[in-house]
Amino acid sequence: MDYKAIINSVIQGDDSLPHVLIYEFDKTKVYRIDLPTPIVMRIAEGETSSQDYRASLQAELAADDGLTSKILHWETREINNQPCGIQIQTFIPEKPIDHFPNEKESKAVVQAVYTLHQRLSWAVDKIGANSAPPFHELIKQIVPMVEDCPVKETAEKLLNDSRYLELMSQPEQTLIYGDLWYKNLLMEKNGSEDVVRFVDIDPLVLGPAILQPGILFSSYFLLTKLLLEPDTLNSFDLGKYLSLWPESLNEFDILLMMLVFPVGLGLRKELQLLQAEDLNPDVRRSTMKSFEQSIEFLSRYMAVRDYHI
C-alpha cells in the first residue's frame, strides 16, 4: 500500500480518497481512511521523534487479538511550516462505551486493562521502556509551577506521605497507561461476550505495577461516574469495583494510587490554564471540576476508613 500517497491526499484534502476527521484535540488530528479495509491516520504537531519503538511496542500490545491498534507506517514532515509526526495505524471499528458500565461490562473492562497491563510489563522486559517519564517525577516537577489550589494541596500531601513515596520508589517500575478515560476504551458485543479494545495508548509513564489499577479505578470508573452519572455518586460502591482486579490489592495502597491520576493530570491542566492568556474563570472551574471532585470523593472515602495522608 502506498502510504505516502495516502498521507499526501489527506493533507491536500483530496476528496477522491474517502476520509473523515474523527478526532481533534490540541495539536493532534486523527482521520479514518475509508478503504476496503479502513485505516487511521494520526497527525501530531511537534511530535518528530522516531516512532520505531512505539511501533514495536504497539505490535506487542496488539498481539493476535487486536487489543489495540498497530502502527503500519510512520514519518515526519512539515505541514503549514510546522514539524509533525504522522502515523498510519490499523482501525478499530468498535465505539466508545458511552455510559457507565453494567456489572458484566465492568468485568470485561477490568480484564482488558489487566491484559494490557501484563503485555506492557512483558514489553518492558523484551524491548525496554524507552524514555517514558516516571509519573512521580512529573508531579514533583509541576507542583512548584502552579498556584495554590485543591489539586496542589493534595499533591503536596502525597509528596510528604511515606507510604506513597515507598510505593512510587519501588525498584521494579513498569510502563503504565496513564489515561484510561472512557473514550479511550472501545467495546463490541461478540455474541454474549463483551470485547474491549484500546485507542490512543498515551500517555505512557513509568510507575509501580499497582499504579495501573489505581489509574483504572480513578480515571475510568470514578471519572466516568462523575461525568455521566454525577447524581448517583453518593451510592457509588467503589469497593465492588476494586474487588474485580484479578490480583489482591491493599485498600490503602490502591486508594493512594487512585489519587495519582486526578493529582497528576489536574496539575498538568492547572499549569496549562495558568499559561493561557485572558482565561475566563468559568472555563477554569469547569476544566478543574472533575479532578477536584475525584480528590474530594477519595478523601472522604479514605477518611471514613480512617486512612489519612
Image (cartoon, rainbow, N blue to C red):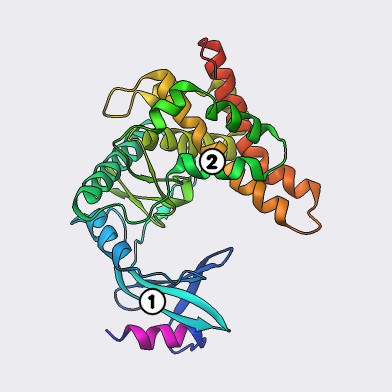
Label of residue 104 in the image? none
- Give the CA distance from mark 2 to mark 1: 41 Å
Q: Are the two marked residues, 2 and 1, in contact with CB atoms closer than 8 angstroms?
A: no
Please state, as top left, top right, bottom left or bottom right, where the C terminus lies in the image. top right
| Figure disc tally | 2
Give the residue at x 30% y 77%. Answer: 36
Please state, as top left, top right, bottom left or bottom right, where the N terminus lies in the image. bottom left
Measured as percent of width and height from the top left, residue 42 is found at: 44, 70
Residue 152 lies in quadrant: top right
Secondary structure found at label 2: helix
Q: Which residue is mark 2?
A: 139
Front one among 247 and 142 = 142
What type is the residue that disc 1 sits on? Asp
**For mark 1, does the 10 Å Cα neighbourhood hold few (<14), some (14 to 19), or many (20 or more) residues?**
some
Q: Which residue is mark 1?
A: 34
Tag in front: 2 or 1: 2
Measured as percent of width and height from the top left, residue 56 is found at: 25, 62
Main SS of residues in magenta: helix
Give the residue at x 59% y 47%. Answer: 268
6 over 299 or under it: above or below: below
Front one among 218 and 152 = 152
What type is the residue that disc 2 sits on? Ile
Measured as percent of width and height from the top left, residue 283 is found at: 74, 49
Q: Earlier in the sequence, mark 2 or mark 1?
A: 1
Residue 4 lies in the magenta-colored region: yes
Give the residue at x 42% y 74%. Answer: 86
Residue 85 lies in quadrant: bottom left
**For mark 2, does the 10 Å Cα neighbourhood hold few (<14), some (14 to 19), or many (20 or more) residues?**
many
Measured as percent of width and height from the top left, residue 125 is found at: 20, 48
**In this picture, which residue range is highlighted in magenta?**
3-10
Front one among 116 and 64 = 116
Give the residue at x 27% y 27%. Answer: 247
